[in-house]
Amino acid sequence: MQHGSLPIDPSTGRPDYSSIDASPISMVLTSAIRRLLIEEVGVDRVPHIPHRKFEGVLNPVREVNDMKGTARQVQVRAKRVFAGILPELGIGWVIPIWRKAIQPIAPQWMSNYAFVLVFTTLFPWLMGPMKGVDHVEVEVPEGLRKVTFNLLPERLSVPQSVKAERCRFVETTGCASVCVNTCKVPSQEWLLEDFGMPMHIQPNYDDFSCKWEFSKPAPPLEEDEAVMVPCFSQCPSEYKGEKDAVRQRMRARMGVGIEGGVDKYTGETLEQIASRASAEAKADAAAPSPQGSAANDASLAVRLDSLRDAQSGGKCWSVDDDRLDLVTDMAKVTAAGVK
């Protein structure tokens, strides 16, 4: 049985990444990133797993994500890991060469293509099989065609973005929070700050595909669809129902993503979401708030504070310290008429 370009492992029912993991590039990068994660966490809790194994990366990733602090602090920690990859491999000199010698003279399509080549070559161990997408037609200089005895066509189709057919990281961690806080946001900021390359990462939580668009600035996080998602169905947290209900209440308040009383992100009604939540979440879903459709700021603050204090592990953006600021900002955007 196949899943995309990979066979299915009958013992797990998931794609078999053994061919990718056997690559020397995969082993080197897996080991390097694991060392950086352990340095951030301070301890290796799974020393029995070889450093070249993908499974050995997941534990320190979870620890980085679950450390005390806000989601922003998690993102900063993860960004330090990404920023340390090239120096860890002994090729930190690539960054100044790119910024000073290549980027100033390279056309945008060429810069984008360079990153397409890098990511499709170096990161299948993390994201699974990838391919270049969003092609543009580029005219081949006549002089170059003559040098190659007209072996090159008059125009080339050059990919500008990368798409993972099924992101291994998202599927394996089973957590949208880990995706956003330890991959999406820190990666976007790392490429912009170190390489001057704007990038928007767009995970698809329905099919686990993920698209990386180069030279496209990422929107503010509070406006990014990647954070407008309920906890995954396999989320072990007993507070899953409350998180889902709170998110939908916010969307209902803004008039975003609700069509005919059904949340288009989850395909459920508010009553269906509330049915798997606690009595507190059910009460919130059933009773109109003083403002008409969503809990007021004070009520929301009390509930989110209680969830944050009680939750023993895992972090979701919806219970982050900045959540109320996010809700306020989104309400301002909606009030200003920006959809």
Image (cartoon, grey):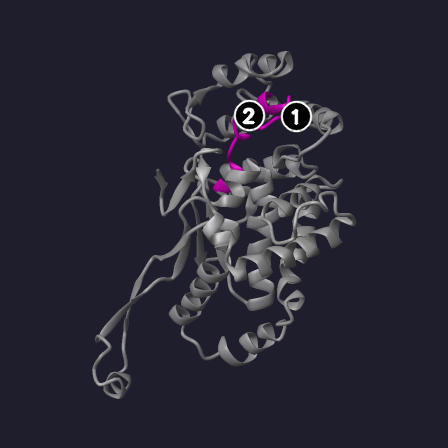
* Residue at image point 38% right, 62% down: 160
- Give the residue type at disc 2: Asp
* Residue at image point 72% right, 29% down: 308
Q: CA distance from mark 2 to mark 1?
A: 13 Å
Left/right placement of residue 47 relative to residue 170 reads: right
Which SS does the magenta portion mostly show? Answer: loop
Displayed quadrant of residue 307: top right
Identify the residue under disc 1. 300
- Give the residue type at disc 1: Leu
Segment tinted magenta in the rendering = 225-241
Report the front residue among 189 and 223.
189
Up/down of 49 relative to 191, above or below: above
Up/down of 40 relative to 329, above or below: below
- Residue 8 appears at what percent x and percent y? 41, 39
- Residue 16 appears at what percent x and percent y? 45, 43
Identify the residue under disc 2. 244
